[in-house]
Image (spheres, rainbow, N blue to C red):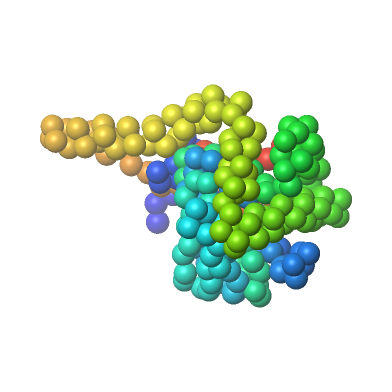
């Protein structure tokens, strides 16, 4: 067996993908459904890879409302602007893959709060924030946040069911206004992660075409384990990694 010092972690996961593991909330909401906080992403496609249990993901988009069953081995993904709500059906366990260097963890997510909350940046920030830690105060705040997001979500879903996409479109516009000031930071993260990963591949292809694969001398392997388990995410309890391009370091602890 070859042994030696473990390498550092200067590189992100393949393609600078974001990664976390989720166990869907089992809290019952006002409509009798157990699950997470409905929200959308502005510039990221997100995927759910189901590793255990049963459940569903409910989505709202220009093509209407969908209820997509989830079971072990199934994958569901949704493009920017799609409202999604994870539904617990029994021990649902999911690995989440996030585009663009983990930008969803840098704020690329807006909850479906009612219009009066979305219209006030201070009210929105207060409603979206959670206290640090994984204790009962954080759990209570996460549940209040989920309930408020479901309140606004049900308004959007009912309107779409009546063939009225006006409220949904206005929510998208409100979400864009909420995140606008974050775009410069996101652009820097995108360039350092997803763009840099693609550019490395381009440089490697150039080297192979020239018959000079010296970059292969840098070949190595990496490993990681979650740095926090059971954190409160948007959809459920979350296991997180402090790796470049995955879950960003959590604050306040």
Answer left or right for 228 relative to 222.
right
Q: Residue at x 76, y 64 (%)?
A: 29
At horizontal 66% and vertical 75% (from top left) the residue drawn is 90
Residue 25 lies left or right of residue 126; in this view the side is: left
Where's residue 207, x and y in %? 19, 33
Is residue 104 visible to the viewer in this orientation of the structure?
Answer: no
Quarter of the image with the N terminus is: bottom left
The extreme right residue here reads: 137
Left or right: residue 121 versus residue 206 is right
Residue placed most toward the observer, 216 or 41: 41
Residue 197 x %, y %: 37, 36
Dividing the picture into quadrants, the one containing residue 105 is: top right
Please identify the quadrant where the C terminus is shown.
Answer: top right
Task: Judge by depth and name the residue closer to the eye, 122 or 166.
Answer: 166
The answer to whether residue 186 shows anywhere in this view is yes
What residue lies at 55% left-to-right and 62% top-to-bottom?
A: 65
Tell me how many marks there are.
0
Write down the quadrant of residue 143 in the picture: bottom right
What residue is at 49 percent from the left and 40 percent from the top? 43
With respect to residue 233, does 128 lie above or below?
Answer: above
Residue 252 at x, y percent in the picture: 76, 37
**Quadrant of residue 180 in the image?**
top right
**Where in the figure is residue 245, as x and y percent of width and height?**
50, 40
- Of residue 227 and residue 202, the one placed in the foreground of this image is 202
The correct choice, above or below, for 119 with respect to 78 in the image is above
Vertical position of residue 80 compared to residue 207: above or below: below
């Amino acid at each position: 067996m070859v042994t030696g010092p473990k390498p550092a972690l200067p590189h992100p996961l393949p393609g600078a993908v974001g990664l976390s593991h989720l166990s869907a909330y089992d809290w019952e909401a006002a409509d009798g459904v157990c699950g997470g906080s409905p929200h959308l992403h502005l510039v990221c496609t997100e995927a759910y890879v189901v590793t255990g249990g049963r459940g569903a993901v409910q989505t709202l988009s220009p093509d209407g409302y969908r209820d997509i069953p989830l079971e072990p081995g199934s994958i569901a993904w949704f493009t920017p602007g799609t409202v999604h709500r994870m539904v617990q059906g029994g021990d649902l366990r999911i690995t989440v893959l996030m585009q663009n260097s983990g930008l969803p963890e840098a704020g690329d997510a807006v909850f479906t709060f009612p219009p009066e909350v979305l219209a006030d940046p201070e009210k929105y920030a207060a409603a979206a924030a959670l206290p640090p830690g994984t204790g009962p105060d954080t759990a209570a705040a996460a549940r209040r946040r989920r309930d408020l997001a479901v309140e606004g979500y049900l308004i959007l879903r009912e309107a779409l069911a009546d063939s009225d996409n006006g409220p949904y479109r206005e929510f998208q516009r409100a979400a864009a206004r909420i995140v606008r000031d974050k775009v410069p930071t996101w652009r820097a993260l995108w360039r350092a992660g997803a763009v840099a990963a693609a550019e490395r591949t381009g440089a490697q292809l150039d080297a192979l075409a020239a018959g000079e694969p010296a970059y292969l001398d840098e070949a190595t392997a990496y490993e990681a384990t979650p740095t926090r388990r059971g954190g409160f995410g948007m959809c459920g309890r979350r296991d997180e990694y402090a790796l470049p391009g995955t879950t960003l370091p959590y604050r306040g602890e």
